[in-house]
Amino acid sequence: MRVNLTYLFFMAFYLKPIYDLFNYRFVIPAYQRGYRWEDRQMRDLLRDLKDFLQRPPSDDDYYCLQPIVVQKVKEKDNEYVLIDGQQRLTSIYMLLSYLDKNRTKPRKKYSFSFERRKVQEDFLSNALFADSEDTSYMINIDTFYMRRAYDFIHNWFEQELSDNEYDTLPSQFRGLFSAPAAGQSAPCVKIIWYELPGDNPMEAFERLNYRRISLTGTELVKAMLLASNSADAIDKDSHNRAHAWDAMEKELQDPMFWSMLSTDTTRLAHIDFVLDIVADQINIDAPKVYKCSRKLDEEKYNYHVIDNYFRRLATIKARRAIVEDVWTRIENTYNKIRNWYDNPRWYHLIGLWRRLAPSANIVSELQQLEQQAAGNGKDEFTRLLRRKVGNLIAVDFRSDEEKSANKHSLEAVELNYEKHPKELLRILLAVNVVTAEQISTDVRFPFYLYDLYNETSLEHIHPQSASTDMTAKQISDSTLLRIKQIKADEKLQSSEVLAACQNLLDEFVNEEWQNDSSHCSEKLWQKIQDYLEIIDKPFRAIAQINETELHSIANMALVDTTTNSALSNNLLDEKRRILQQRNQRRISEDFGKTRIDKLKAHDDAMYLMPATERAFSKFYTPGSPGDMRFWLKADREAYLNAIIEIYNTLTME
């Protein structure tokens, strides 16, 4: 389960210096796990603070900790339920205790209240973690980790620092957590403060931390970049970035825009697609010690990379400059993607590429294509993009004899439904996408509808015969439909055909043909095979189609699986009626920019793609379309020529 982004993205969040928390009391609910920081996490914190101090920072600079999430305790001043952030605040609390250990008057710190965990509360409040003689920490796992963390802090200062560092760093550390004199500013440590509305911390905890899943990487990056300096003052830069962030997210939620980039409808925040691109760019250029592996933490990969970038540049740049740098990268990346989308030709080629190569890192490859085309204008980028897509659909199954006769590869006998269904699917998808573009410059192929209805089923335009891969009931149903068509049309009737129809009707009375659980048995098939051949003859004679042509690309169109079943063994006119009816029931395109994960397909609906619609309407046939019930030879030839023309535009230089 993912964090509820709708709930989180509109929470108020801003920066608070740690010293602003010293009058606060934090309640740790009983349902939260205890303290669990390891040496690695404490070491990273201490080293980061040391690096920050050695820059040196400007007076208004700050070191920023990850967010904490709180909810105000009703009718109690300065008391908050700590929903997320217990680990960070406990660690800072123990660091402050170490820094004050030799002072005659230790500073006041924030305090903790643990629900139903009195041992842990006393251990922190009485600073027993700092008492080397105390052994009570051994009886509780939470206090054990607290003691170990404090020992690490102690040893880091006492053993890992040089003499000069030991003389100066503790006081500098103290300064980071001390309020400056009135009217002055100084470098400090700040925390990103999320304050949730409402008065039900358990509900908030479940929303934010269900199954112990903490804030996502995207949420953490957003907090790093957009947090204001205080709850009251308006930070103009943060305010502007927040508006720009929301605008980008809104545009990316547009199903048309998003489906150009991705087929993933599970992402709730689509801007993480942009953040991942930025993170990949930063990660590639990062020194080895700062590189991150996506495999180790996919959910927070972008945050880890960008956080490492902040840490790496902290010694040479102010935090605000790093924020501006990362934000510029995000805006530039988004604007580049938006530029691709705004060009209808690029939109169609990129969306097609995404479906032809679903696992490819197409954004990275697109950027490489742009570099190759640099200086040669948009036409060169279009050419390279078209060539990339063309390579994904290109096929050549011609025999030497067919090549010598200059027979086109799409006319070759080898390219057919039974041997090469994947190749046919890819080519026909490309034909539908390019057809949408050819209709009008204002028309865009809706990839999200193609995905939503999973239009990946190859439909025979002229119906194929019953076959042994069907169940007995499917064979009987399709054959009974064929018999009904014969009885309705005298042109299909002959004494031989009518006799075969009667023999089949007599056979299907048997209960064996009502079994729908497995493929037709060889025994049953042998009883009807000759009769099926007879009743198919008049249909094939009118359509002038043989077995080879029946399974060629000239007799194929793309639909979804349920529509394929609904079309059954019907003739062209009835198939056309069913397609139009199902298309009218599909989700409307005027729904506005509804989140794509909210769109729901229906079993009795489909998206009738443009080339599929044209084929079943005989759009491609020149002159009179003839009998609208049959997919005639002239229809197939015209359709194939249209397919070849589009295929050639994509595959030929």
Image (cartoon, rainbow, N blue to C red):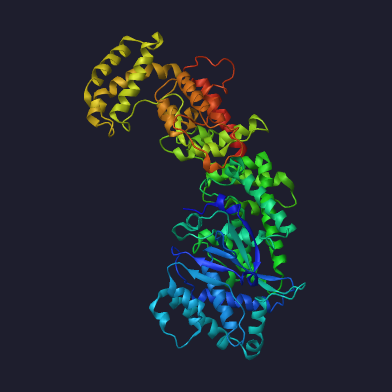
Q: Is residue 469 left or right of residue 418?
A: left
Q: Quadrant of residue 167?
A: bottom right
**Foreground residue, 652 or 620?**
620
Q: Residue furthest front?
A: 75
Tell me if I can see residue 371 in this picture. no
**Foreground residue, 533 or 607?**
607
**Foreground residue, 214 or 498?**
214
Q: How many marks?
A: 0
Q: Is residue 599 above or below residue 303?
A: above
Q: Position of residue 246 (x, y in %)?
A: 65, 50
**Foreground residue, 587 or 547?**
587
Q: Give the residue drawn at x 72%, y 52%.
A: 374
Q: Give the residue drawn at x 59%, y 33%.
A: 589
Q: Position of residue 89 (x, y in %)?
A: 55, 71
Q: Is residue 223 above or below residue 637?
A: below
Q: Position of residue 453 (x, y in %)?
A: 49, 36
Q: Position of residue 231 (x, y in %)?
A: 68, 60
Tell me if I can see residue 561 in this picture. yes
For the C terminus, the image quarter is: top right
Q: Is residue 370 above or below residue 109?
A: above
Q: Quadrant of residue 506?
A: top left
Q: Residue furthest right?
A: 183
Q: Is residue 138 left or right of residue 46?
A: left
